[in-house]
Image: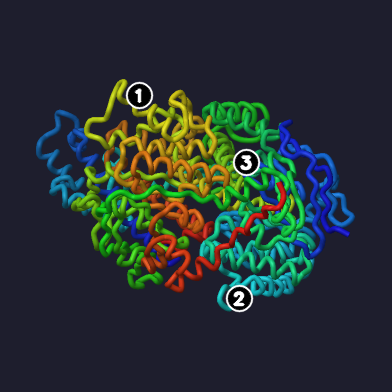
Amino acid sequence: MLRYTLKRLLSLIISLAVASVVIFAVIEVVPGDPASFMLGVNAQPDTLAALRAELGLDVSRVQRYFNWVGGMLTGDFGTSYTYRTPVSQMIADRLWVSLPLALFALTLSTLIAFPSGIYAAARRGKPGDLTVMGATQLGIAVPNFWFAMMLVLIFAINLRWFNAGGFAGWENGLWTGLHSLTLPAIALALPQAAILARVMRSSLLDILGEDFMRTARAKGLSRRQALWRHGVRNALIPVLTIIGLQFSFLLAGSIIIEQVFYLPGLGRLVFQAISARDLIVVESVVMLLVFAVITVNFLVDLAYAAVDPRLRSRT
Amino acid sequence: MSLLQIKNLSLSIHGVPILKQVDLSIAPGQIVAVTGESGSGKSMTALAVMQLLPNGAEASGAIRLHDVDVLNRPEAEMCALRGASIGMVFQEPMTALNPVKTIGDQVMETILIHKAMPPAQARTRAEEVLTRVGLPPDRFPLSRYPHELSGGQRQRVVIAMAIALRPKLLIADEPTTALDVTTQAQILDLLKGLVSEYGMGLLIITHDLAVVADMADRITVMRHGEVVESGATQHLLRHMRHPYTRMLFEASGHQVILPDTVEPRPLLQVAQVVRDYRLPRTGLLGPQRHHRAVDGVSFTLNKGERLGLVGESGCGKSTLTRAILGLEEVQSGEIRLDGQPVFTGHRPNLAVRRKMQVVFQDPYGSFNPRHRVARLVTEPFHLLERPPTGTERQDRIAEMLTAVGLSPDDSNKYIHEFSGGQRQRIAIARALIIRPQLILFDEAVSALDVSVRAQILDLLVDLCATYDLTYLFISHDLSVVRTITDRVLVMQSGRIVEQGETEQVFSDPQHRYTQSLIAAAPQLPEIGQGAA
């Protein structure tokens, strides 16, 4: 198990290193000098040079790469070209919205998907299964911003249980923060839950056909006992994979939902930074997302091993 | 009074009749074997007793266990019965256990699910039964996972689960079909021992008539869902009344006479071949370990010769086969076909590759279901530099299909339209179509019913006469190898421990391993000649 973990960890570090080179190279290839972009076409050459030096653009590319990576390792992500504020601060502010939102949505999605997937698998072909399958079909087909608008219409405008948008901030208490993230989290969670429920169902159906499920029944377990004791854990591997993918998506892919609910999240930050050609922000956010994705994959790998003893003994 | 009484059991699944008026009874301490070919309904009979039938099954008649009517019992009461009064052992030990739970947990579950005793006591009982089936906890701790055990050991765990509560009836559905002969002998001994020790009734389902004759008190022969004949073993063997029973026994011991070989000249030369596999390291910095699957193997196969290769699973048969086919590179030694090496540099030698073909075990898994037979049969053509086209291609397909006993019209059909035996004929046609110098039969008749197997063996003999086949016949089934080969190699732990003329090796084995293999293989009894 230790060997397995270390191997995964090593692969995590290598992936991060490769990703950082690729991200840096791609951003470097993008035409346009941020300094001249910031000062406009009529800038004086010496002002330009001064700004370039200030932004750290006057050294060689290799040097710039190491400065960038070294800075990130110490928490210094550089200074935003457009806002002239530390990028780390900008990201941290947004992360405090996006990360809880992603976790909130993922928790909701799992809480919805597991029971409905298991329920559907246990009643394959019966009305319960067909209902769940119909609902997930709808959940996948309907875009999440539509859910978002419906939620606002019902719960914010008609019932007035929630605010229609904006983020109250964590300084007013955990409950207030969560309260303002609830509607966006539900809107994000519904399509994800639909996908996850389908994966759970089909994975479980595969397992239900396995020989060991018959063995369990021959021991005297009821259908339900066999499903819970022998089925669910074996069905988890593909489900964990999807959960890992969904988390990565939720962290950065919620830009439309952030827009609908007026949330200051990472998605909006990236969008603004790209429009403003604030490359250092883009670079840093992308690197952060890559870091999140790779870390989540690492955790998923560890979860695989926790679920399946065969992986622990293999390397 | 009988323990299990099945009377007039009829079963249909989604309206398709599966069982017709089956009668069967088992007394305590008695071993009853149900035998027959695939589709005869023997497994369904067992599942009906367990009431673990597939969806859409409708049964009529009566199944009584002691005085309990099993057929009309509510599901909750059946759960109480399964595992406690009836235990069941399945065919495939590799998949019959939950891979994510320890063997201790799985054996204890039988006890705990019936609330037969408190957890601490259940643990002791689990240790006892595992010891009884030959897995003492000091060598096989309860914390082992199934993947850490061999097939035979896993089957012992399954048996331990089935007998943990000392059921009155044990059902074993092909319990040894997936196991090697020596392991099979041990498992059958274990089952026999348990029956006499616990006074259980044992319903054993098997297609292997040698096993049946060896251990059963009574035999029931089934065909197409009907019992065609049943009776006390010795009596039935002496006086087979039904022609189907007679046919089954004759086909099981089917003998063929191979045509004489042509002038011997070396075709396949295997010299000092070694194949290593890397194993996972034990600790974090443990040394790199290797498993030597093939260890210094040398032999020569002459043109026109039919060579057998026998040995138990894990002995290196398959690895050697893959090496000969040039599918894997060997670490040292050399394999030459017709003087040319199968591997040049680190790449398989295509010029040699097109002189060899292979027929695999599974007639269901070895064809692409989306292609028609014509395309399937001509697959090896891609090995040729100038594959035949147009009418020449059509002629070749027609010739091959005819040669294997099918019709040229079959070339437009899809593979699902054929039975297992017909598929194996198509596999042979596919191997033959480029007239290879060497064919490898990798357990090619192991998955077939005895009557079909007999037909395929006859077909091979015909083809030998027509095409002067040279083949390597790899099998764990000693009786088949004995009749279909001229010479045989016996392989153990990666080494050839004995080789020689087939009849010589079988009648007078020299190596201890060969002797133990032959001793472990159950013998078909002499068939009685008295009745018609």
Please provide percent x and percent y for residue A149: 56, 27
Circle 3 residue: A117
**Label 3 CA crowd tier, 10 Å (few <14, some 14–19, many 20+):** many
Circle 1 residue: B394
Depth order, front residue of B37/B527: B527
Quick check: marks 2 and 1 in contact, CB under 8 Å?
A: no
Of labels 2 and 1, earlier in sequence is 2
What amino acid is labelled 3 in the image? Gly
Quick check: marks 3 and 2 in contact, CB under 8 Å?
A: no
Instruction: Work out which residue is located at the far bottom of the displayed protein and give it.
Output: B138
**Is A175 located above or below residue B279 in the figure?**
above
**Is A193 located above or below residue B187 in the figure?**
above
Please provide percent x and percent y for residue A166: 52, 36
Mark-to-mark CA distance, 3 and 1? 51 Å
Circle 2 residue: B137
Mark-to-mark CA distance, 3 and 2? 39 Å
Helix, strand or loop under label 3 = helix
Q: Chain of mark 3?
A: A
What amino acid is labelled 1 in the image? Gln
Please provide percent x and percent y for residue A33: 18, 36
Check the picture and name the quadrant holding the N terminus of chain A: bottom left
Q: Chain of mark 2?
A: B
